[in-house]
Amino acid sequence: MAKVPKRPSPRGQQDGPVVDLARRLGVLLGELGLSEIEASVGQIRVRLQRGGVQTAAAVPAPAPVVASVEHPTAPAPAVADSASGVTIEAPMVGTFYRASSPTAEPYVSVGDLVKEGQILCIIEAMKLMNEIESKVAGRIVKVLVENAHPVEFGQPLFLIDPAR
């Protein structure tokens, strides 16, 4: 990540932690080619979005909510029912990986039976590897994302035919 130097504000003062965090996130937004990014540091939460009405928003977040809801090691993939099965969606923006390493076998393939709680893939977000688990038992009908490709929040990853 490129280091963003602190710049004096128009009044000659150093920028505060909100502006500093926003600048650092802006650099990441450009480097990773993302359309939106959000981060929390202590009580400060900043969200940047390209092409939207909001460009930056800083909101003090209560510490217990941030710790319990946005804990990066316990992602909760969204599950949506469709006519042909259950869609497992990306719970975050990141890079989708089908296996734990480039030489390892994929966690699951089309046709595999999976149990509820079984690891389906990994999404790497800001150098953290987040294991995505199945929320239903059933058979993998389709893998909707190519290995090592970026995914957006809510993007469908897998289609699962639930066990009856």
Image (cartoon, rainbow, N blue to C red):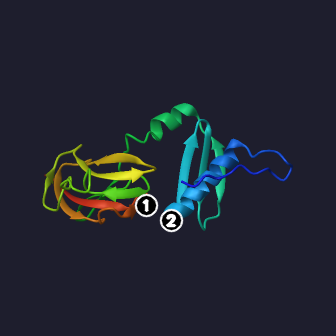
The residue nearer to you, when weighing 6 against 85, is 6
For residue 90, what is the image quadrant? bottom left
Q: Is residue 159 above or below residue 125?
A: below
Q: Is residue 40 left or right of residue 71?
A: right
- Work out which residue is located at the far top of the displayed protein and give it: 64
Q: Is residue 152 above or below residue 9?
A: below
- Name the residue type under label 1: Glu
Q: Is residue 67 left or right of residue 121?
A: right
Q: Is residue 116 left or right of residue 43?
A: left
Residue underneath mark 2:
33
The residue nearer to you, when weighing 56 against 81, is 56
Q: Secondary structure at mark 2?
A: loop
- Which disc is residue 152 wearing? 1
| Residue at 27% in and 47% down | 135
Quarter occupied by the N terminus: bottom right
Q: Secondary structure at mark 1?
A: loop
Q: Earlier in the sequence, mark 1 or mark 2?
A: 2
